[in-house]
Image (cartoon, coloured by chain):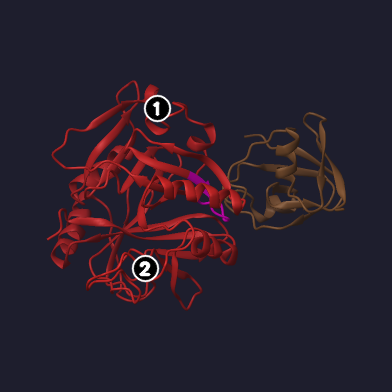
Chain colours: A red, B brown
Amino acid sequence: MAINKTIRPGLIQLRVLDLDKTLDFYKNILGLDEVCRTSDGRVCLKAYDEFDHHSVTLKLADTAGLDYVAFKVDGPETLENMKAATEAFGYAVDEVAPNTDQPGFGKRYGFTIATGHRFELYCDVDLSAKHPGLKNPDIWEEEPRGMRATRLDHFLLYGPNIAESERFCQEVLGMFVPEVCNTEDGSRMATWITGNNKPHDLAFVEYPQAGKIHHVGFYLNDWSAVGNAADLIAINRLKLDIGPTRHAITRGLSIYFWEPSGNRIEVYAGGYTAYPDNPQRVWDASELGRGLFYYSGEVIPSFLEIVT
Amino acid sequence: MAKAYKITVANTGQSFMCSQDEVLLSAMKRARCGPIHYGCFGGGCGVCKMKIISGDVKFVKRMSREHVTLEEEQRGYVLICCVKPLSEVTLVECKK
């Protein structure tokens, strides 16, 4: 029994401009394992501490950015109920047949939300060949590499009408909203949303252009792992955006940088435990600097303005 | 010793040197010269878009077509994180 019907964001497909160089980053610096390649040349990857078949798919394209994100739900009944609820909410739903474009994944339902992003839902996915131990398990089977990312954690999406996207996540996906940021006139500027005890599975920032992604977040074990990530960013001449720092929003320990195709990555540790019955935390837009970067209290322009 | 070329920003008349082994954006950033808008350094975010008025460059990374279309590329638009100089180059800042 899941604590919530939407278990987690379990799959993301990203567009990259240079497959070899970017794949080298995801494998050897971030520390993901290559699982398989599709017949059309996409590469499927997973983090060492994940059980499902894969969680990240890279596709060579002539633009960087996000193709879609997919959420794992707790069973076939929930999947069908959510499909019906999505249609009732007003979004047209298409179906992706099992084990087609994403090896190991069962049937997926896809649709586009208000902010212009394609979301998908699925409940069945194969256990990966390389997964954490199950019987008297060690802490890992194969020593983690590089930044030692443990899992795909969350993403921040930019687009118009985040209020509707937030309402969709609550009403259809059964998620809750531990933290929000409002403008002076009371409209939503940003929202942090989760389906479990993580402080966020996803977040939205209000933005005129549809379908943009600010970053993908991967989870690290602790503050020292964030420091190790900072060392690897410097050693490998990756372009740092900001950090290591602390978020007041989510309380995460964090560093942001760009991978070789220009998609922004966050590696993140800590964060509070979210419960659906806790009161919502509310930030004023004027205090967002402190909310995002607690130590300096200031937002750098590149952080808010650059998206892919 | 790698050969270096003079790079001029036409809007301001300022110039800086860029080695043939270095992308224009890195040299511009180091020289603190020109518009120096920069983000991803990977050809993806489009922040460092400029137009080449004269001179030759070599592409070392792909540019996102969302930010520089093929037609724009043929007219001299580039993301300056993606190119190294092959001669003296004159650039102009794009209007936002």
Whether the magenta-drawn stretch holds residue A120 is answered as no
Up-down: is A85 above or below B29? below
For disc 1, the chain is A
Question: What segment is highlighted magenta in the picture?
Answer: A256-264
Estimate the x, y position of residue A296 in percent, counting from the top left: 46, 27
Which percent across, then down, holds residue B36?
68, 36
Whether the residues at callouts 1 and 2 have beta carbons within 8 Å, the answer is no
- Label 1: element kind: helix
Which of pointers 1 and 2 indicates the residue nearer the eye? 1
Amino acid type, label 1: Arg
Local secondary structure at mark 2: loop
Q: Nearer the viewer, residue A178 or A69?
A: A178
Residue B43 horizontal/vertical position (percent): 62, 51
Could you tell me if residue A212 is visible in this image? no
| Residue A257: in magenta span | yes
Q: Which residue is mark 2?
A: A54
Q: Give the letter of the chain under mark 2.
A: A
Residue A177 badge: none
For the residues labelled 1 and 2, the Cα–Cα distance comes to: 35 Å
Q: Nearer the viewer, residue A179 or A135?
A: A135
Tell whether A4 sits left or right of A61: left
